[in-house]
Amino acid sequence: MRGPFGTELVNVIQPCVAPLYWQKAGSSDAPSSGSAFFVNTGKALFGITAGHVYDAFAEEASLDPGKVCWFYNFPIADLRSRLISKGRECDVATFEILPSEISRLDRRAAPWPPSIPPKGKSVLLAGFPGIGKRMTASGALTFGMFKSMTNVDSLSERDISLERPPDDQVTDVDGKGLPPHDIDLGGMSGDPLFTVLDGAGIVSWALAGVIYEYGAAFEIIKAVKADVIGEDGSING
């Protein structure tokens, strides 16, 4: 899965992910942010982010009603009115999204159903760390994407854990060199984690988890297993 093929796999998942942030309309202040993605289960279309990302927006919005939630530069107003479900113990939240909104964002839904990878399996992730945010002269925000392909280090009843392997085992998916060991990945909570499926000569990918925690310097990333999410957007756990 290394080399150009691994790069292509990681690039395929890019359109499923969007930066999520909140600020007042017209504000030039640096906004708080996370990430989100979308799924169509056949029964429902909805968005997914980390529970603590939703909680952060809800807390700030309750103190300042002028705060608006945005995907890229598209406002969706108050995310609280769109909440479907939030985990009691799992750090995941789901919310309503319209097909026209996903189209406007030039995003697409991730594949369903989930598939939980075993230890050692290749996984893909892509998202929008806060260090990639830039304000243009016109006042619009732009976002740089972080992409990676690595392997599952361990699993628990609820989580999938990844550890950064030695540099000679890390895939340089963009040909721009490996990320520094002191990279700050703040803002990637809510990103999807995908597993690579291969069988009978066919390679595909499936949702594996929702990233909710990352250690300093990209040394550890944790994701909630995506099978806690029901096809109607409910969360079991």
Image (spheres, rainbow, N blue to C red):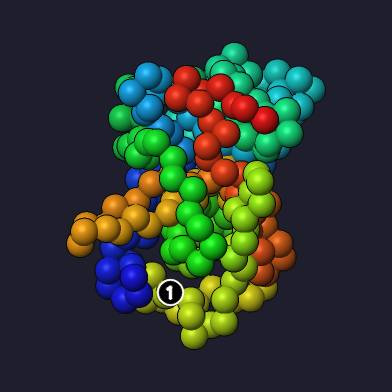
Q: Residue at x 67, y 38 (%)?
A: 91
Q: Residues within 10 Å of mark 1 (few under 14, many from 20)?
A: many
Could you say where residue 38 lies in the image, as x and y percent from the top left? Answer: 43, 34
Which quadrant of the structure image shows residue 155? bottom right
Could you say where residue 5 lies in the image, as x and y percent from the top left? Answer: 27, 69
Q: Is residue 32 above or below residue 64?
A: below
Instruction: Say left or right for 70 vs 174.
Output: right
Q: Residue at x 61, y 21 (%)?
A: 85
Q: Residue extending furthest front? A: 200
Q: Residue extending furthest bottom? A: 168
Of residues 64 and 215, which is closer to you in this image? 215
Instruction: Say left or right for 76 vs 164.
Output: left
Q: Residue extending furthest top? A: 81
Could you say where residue 75 lies in the image, as x and y percent from the top left? Answer: 49, 26
Of residues 171 and 105, which is closer to you in this image? 171
Could you say where residue 63 lies in the image, as x and y percent from the top left? Answer: 79, 22
Quadrant (top left, top right, bottom left, bottom right) of the C terminus: top right
**Label 1 sits on residue:** 171
| Amino acid, disc 1 | Thr
Asked if one can make out residue 166 in the rendered structure from this viewpoint, the answer is yes
Asked if one can make out residue 27 in the rendered structure from this viewpoint, the answer is no
Q: Is residue 183 above or below residue 203?
A: below
Of residues 194 and 108, which is closer to you in this image? 194
Q: Residue extending furthest left? A: 201
Q: Residue at x 43, y 54 (%)?
A: 195
Quadrant (top left, top right, bottom left, bottom right) of the N terminus: bottom left
Q: Residue at x 66, y 52 (%)?
A: 156
Under circle 1, the secondary element is: loop
Instruction: Say left or right for 101 vs 160.
Output: left
